[in-house]
Image (cartoon, rainbow, N blue to C red):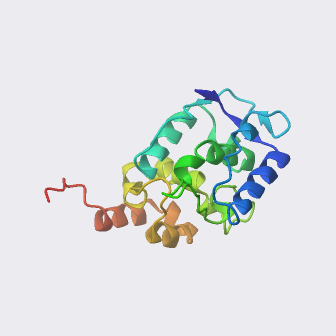
Amino acid sequence: MVEVRRLNERGIEAFENYISGLSNDGGLTLPLGILTDDRTSEPLDIELTVNHLAEFATRYDMGVYLVDLLKQVRSQQLLGDSGFWTWLALCWFDQLCPLDSKGKRKPKKPYNYVLSPNWNHRPRHALYTTWMLVANHRESARFMLSKKPSARGELIEQLAARQYFMSCRGVIEAAHRIYFDSSPDFS
């Protein structure tokens, strides 16, 4: 377990530089020191600890963990906190952007890991969106989050691009019934 912090401006910039550097050398060492270094991160105003070694089978499982973690705090405190969400993405970067068979990482756009102030990019943040979907829609969000933590499906991209759909419980519940089969696979 590790105490959750937030990346400061310097820490966010260092993480963004790391992500950008992966396009040239996908084997760069993950800069986990950024998480605890006082020059790149700072304590939260609240006490939270996270299992940084937790492994999640699906993005939904990751969302359930985050909902449980954040149920003890007012979510408004952390809702738009880029440093907090970016810290979490770096903490679990091995799952969000795992090494391939050649020991290289192939990251998506930086805003998938660094919570952007641009509202058009915010729904693409791997953890923020995952948490929000599970917090707002519980089991009905499973159909969008049933892949590995590193995978994003086309369905979530399309729904996340339309804020109305993401916040409308009826739309999400209907889509869950249409797109998710909870029956056991006997093949």
Is 44 situated above or below 85? above
Q: Is residue 146 above or below residue 78?
A: below
48 or 57: nearer the viewer: 57
Judge from the rendering whether residue 27 lies leftward or rightward of residue 14; answer left or right. Answer: left
Q: Quadrant of the N terminus?
A: top right
**Occupied quadrant, residue 163:** bottom right
Residue nearer the viewer, 27 or 50: 27
Q: Residue at x 54, y 54 (%)?
A: 99
Is 67 on the left-hand or right-hand side of 21? left
Where residue 169 sits: x, y (%)? 44, 59
Drawn side of residue 13 relative to residue 54, left or right: right
Instruction: Report the number of discs.
Output: 0
Quadrant occupied by the C terminus: bottom left
Most extreme residue toward the left is 186
In this orientation, does residue 132 appear? no
Instruction: Give me the residue at 66% from left, 33% from top.
Output: 4
Task: Let me know if residue 24 appears in the view.
Answer: yes
Q: Give the answer, above or below, for where 175 lies relative to 183.
A: below
Q: Position of residue 26 (x, y in %)?
A: 64, 60
Horizontal arrangement in the rendering, residue 171 relative to residue 4 (left or right): left
User: For this rendering, which residue is in front, 48 or 17?
Assistant: 17
The x, y position of residue 133, in whole percent, is 49, 54
Residue 41 image position (x, y, % from top left):
79, 38
Q: In the picture shown, does residue 145 fall above or below 66?
A: below
Task: Identify which residue is drawn at 71% across, 65% down.
Answer: 24
